[in-house]
Amino acid sequence: MPDHPDPALLEQLKDHLKYYAETGIDRFDPKAVSGALRLAASLRGERKSRSRPLRQSAPSTQTSLFAESVPASVRDSSLEEVRNDLGDCQRCKLCRDRTHIVFGAGHPQARLVFVGEGPGVEEDRQGLPFVGRAGQLLTRMIEAIQMRRDEVYICNVVKCRPPGNRTPQEDEVTACSPFLERQLAVLQPEVICCLGLTAAQTLLQVRTPIGRLRGKIHSFRGAQLVATYHPAYLLRNPPAKREVWEDLKRIRSLLSSS
Ligand code: SF4
């Protein structure tokens, strides 16, 4: 360790410890802490050496079906094309009560994409994903793995708010999910984190409960997929943060090993 620790690194560690405290974790594995320090240092090194902070220019060791199907030269503009194709969408009944379509937001070359269920009241009002209380918790989850919110991409299975924040119905998911799939094809993330049951079941095409989908690494068209609980669920069930922290560590490990 240097004589004078990097203040930014100390700040990251402070956030990290705060998250531990909030999740009720009061013991630390020394190996895990030194691993976190190494990861934070390597991420900082990577950020300094890149003009665009996220996707490495060197080829990934992973095989990506997305990479084979989407030329890198059209990647940035294609998100815009998907949004244009969505247009003033009326493909399902969720169009009736929406204020804004919430398409998604974030870095167009994100290595990590979070997929939620659908917009809530605040998201519908602002036209942006995860900007309410659950969004604030998601931001803290992202920061807990030494990333910034503007380094990832965040979107939902359905782009319009279901009335009363109900779960999207099958016909609504069927109408909207092709646009999610196109977003993911353009983004070519290395890791996808499904927030909650709807996102995980939609992408994995299964009916398995979220409790059995989390804790594993799945595959989605060449990307590695981790399912975890939705931040809104965590607000209602704080003890589940412990399991989410395990999922976040899994994501961090996938990103640092690729
Ligand atoms: S939820 Fe999706 S498919 Fe339905 S109206 Fe909104 S954008 Fe269109």
Image (spheres, helix red, strand yellow):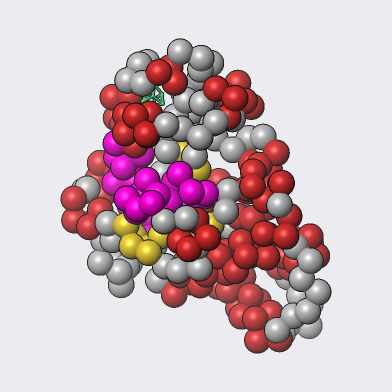
Give the residue at the far left of this rendering.
69
The quarter of the rendered structure image containing the N terminus is bottom right
Dominant SS of magenta comes to: helix
233 shown above or below 96: below
| Magenta span | 178-207
Towards the viewer: 173 or 217:
173
Which residue appears at 48% of the width and 48% of the height?
197
- Left or right of 68 in this view: 156: right
Residue 174 seen in the figure: yes
Q: Position of residue 201 (x, y in %)?
A: 40, 49
Which residue appears at 32% of the width and 57% of the height?
220
**Residue 178, located in which quarter of the rendered image?**
top left
Q: Position of residue 157 (x, y in %)?
A: 42, 38
Towards the viewer: 230 or 99:
230
Ligand 1 is found in the corner quadrant, namely top left
- Left or right of 71 in this view: 49: right
Which residue appears at 28% of the width and 24% of the height?
85
Give the residue at the far top of this rendering.
96
Magenta segment includes 185: yes
223 shown above or below 232: below
Towards the viewer: 98 or 85:
98
Magenta segment includes 59: no
109 shown above or below 155: below
Which residue appears at 50% of the width and 56% of the height?
210
**Residue 91, located in which quarter of the rendered image?**
top left
